[in-house]
Image: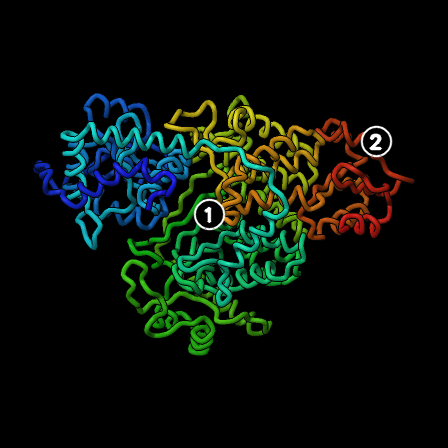
Amino acid sequence: MLITSKGKVLYYLISIITFIWLYPNLFGQTKLKDNNPEKQYVNRLAKESSPYLLQHKNNPVDWYPWGDEAFQKALELNRPIFLSIGYSTCHWCHVMEEESFEDEQVAQLLNDNFISIKVDREERPEIDHLYMTVCQAMTGKGGWPLTIIMTPDKYPFFAGTYFPKKGRMGRPGMIELLPAISDAWVNKKDELIQSANQIKKYLIDSNNKELGDQLNQLILTNTNSQFIDRYDKTHGGFGTKPKFPSPHNLIYLLRYHNMSGDKTSLLMVEKTLQEMRLGGIFDHVGFGFHRYSTDTEWILPHFEKMLYDQAMLTLAYTEAYQITNNQLYKDTAEEILYYVQRNMTDKRGGFYSAEDADSEGEEGLFYLWTIDEIKNILSNEESELLINTYGLNKEGNYDDEATGNRTEKNILYLKEPINNIELKNRLNQIIKKLYQARKKRIHPLKDDKILTDWNGLMIAAYAKAGDVFNSDDYIQQAEKSAQFILKNLTDNNGRLLKRYRNGNAGVDAHLDDYAFFIWGLLELYEATFNATYLAEALQLSNIMVDEFWDVTNGGFFLGGEKSEKLIVRAKTGYDGAMPSGNSVAAMNCSKLNRITGETKWAEISDKIFITFSNEIQQTPSGYASMVNAFLFNTDNPKEIVIVGSGKDSDTISAIEKIKSEYVPNKVIIFKDTDDELNKLSPLAKWTVTQETIDEKTTYYICQDFACKIPTTDLDLALKFINE
């Protein structure tokens, strides 16, 4: 379904595409050349760094990476572009590769009639966002692999997702689709160009944001109400299957509860966190969360493990622990971090991107168990306990996502929480045996590229968990990763780069890289009070404004001013699997305003809210991260300045006590009287008059830049903080 207000723009295009799909025989078939089936292929992607592109380097398709060479060749040969966008751990990307891109008949059609380009969406999010917008507008849905056919000028006129080799169940196949579009390009090119121009106009129009009204507190209630309407009271989560964790939504609800006292919002979060931890979406053997659940009960996962999910879920479970003191949430956060440390951390400090859903060509094979396998590994008593506790049976509990057929394989999940300590310890020993047995299996592919934006999220998660759980190890891991990014993913001018792999850094950074990494640095500052992290955050924030800020209409573009020019400079505030870059930037700027006292940061965050105000009002739950940033500014934000000796145990104990309080609408600044370097920090100007009283640790609690009376009484300071 087309976006209603833009339907007329694309109506003509849809008519052409539908005609081509329904009557491909009218356009004839391209004659294929003979090929040697034993021939080994190596295409241009062999020179790339992206694991996803390298997966396709031996396809018979004559792939190009995104770049001038491909577009110049398309102009020279007067051919349309076949653009395929995906990522290395995408199950259906693997399926389409095996069915179509490894097939010589399909490859010949592409090679003879198109210029074919492969793009890793994780390296080039602006390209992905632009063309995914087209796909969703034209078809009413999106996903990966994303298939776009466009002119050599990058204007799309056809969009879809997965296509099999041969058409089935109403879905056209590549061998029907490609000849039809190729023939239309030759014989109906003017019509396709006209359609492409209409899409260009649609993209430009839809990307122009009309400034809305100032947000008010009603949006906070409306956002909460939308989540209530979508909430699954039986299994937790929101909506029906498939269910995504979307932890940024849970973080909003926690903070809304903290502000309002609304019990329903906290109930929704706790139910969801508990059900996810019980379900098969959590890896009970090796820890970490899979990407989403294919059912409503969180039992049957889609098996990819993404770094950003681990980061955001760690933050959600950590905040839930802060507000409830429920040990389950702390345990879960620490299990996630243990998984990331063991499986996803480069020895130099960066974090890898993902682990695949597939191994040995089968989705989930690495994670599934038959009863016979269990009995071969465990004793009879252990097997019986595991089977009864984790929902296993002889027939299997796992339905294949592609076919819907029941297999004899099982995914581990819990029917109810395990509260008995003795039973929990026994099961932990059994699980360790399964883990050792599973280690011997062929592992899913690991995407070992290091992305600046996702590392920023993981740095924030480690720093926050280190602060809340009082763990120096977590904080040190966050620092190690931050240092890796600063050393390896910045250029000589201090600008960020996006991707690092095998010693090579490259690709222009996007908004998310700046926003997410700045978030990580700000969390690190509050965890360590090392002013260097704050200085880096400020420097990168200034670069972000210089290169991404829309001076005319407000908001940040996804691509920088110096990045490649696409049809439009896309701008979005809508949350996907992660918070949007504009949402995180709004929160960062709000915090920088409170930390430094510089009003320009407040002006930027306010302008972001106005830029996306109309869209937020329509679907506030889709902008929960931005509403969360607005909540930060609305809920009596506190600036807490602690002045004392960093060597004094009472001072350190007081800081830990203040940090243990769940006050998400705060910033904390520590002025260490023993640290001469702090006098050179970005805080030096406005904290210069804040000193100790009677040489005791002193607390300055400010709200909206109006300060309470300074006090050396920790209890009084906590009272001021919690007012």
Residue 346 seen in render: no
Residue nearer the viewer, 546 or 405: 546
Q: Residue at x 44, y 65 (%)?
A: 297
Q: In this view, does 633 lie to the left or right of 373?
A: right
Q: Earlier in the sequence, mark 2 or mark 1?
A: 1
- Residue 708 drawn at (x, y percent): 83, 42
> At which x and y percent is residue 513?
50, 35
Q: Is mark 1 on a helix, strand or loop?
A: loop
Q: In the image, is residue 428 above or below residue 207?
A: below
Q: In which quarter of the image is residue 633?
A: top right
Q: Where is residue 629 in the image (x, y as percent from the top left)?
A: 60, 42
Q: Nearer the viewer, residue 596 or 708?
A: 708
The location of residue 391, given as percent across then percent down, is 43, 72
- At 67% from the left edge and 58% from the top edge, which residue is drawn? 261
Residue 718 can be seen, yes or no: yes
Residue at horizontal 41 percent and vertical 34 percent from the top: 206
Q: Are marks 2 and 1 in contact (CB under 8 Å)?
A: no
From the image, tell me which residue sits under label 2. 689
The kind of secondary structure element at disc 2 is loop
Q: In this view, does 584 lie to the left or right of 670?
A: left
Dot 2 amino acid type: Thr
Count of numbered circles on the image: 2
Could you give the CA–CA distance between mark 2 and mark 1, rounded to whole angstroms?
A: 44 Å
Q: Residue 104: which quarter of the image? A: top left
Residue at point 18%, 36% (across, down):
181
Q: Look at mark 1 in the image and give the residue it sits on.
A: 577
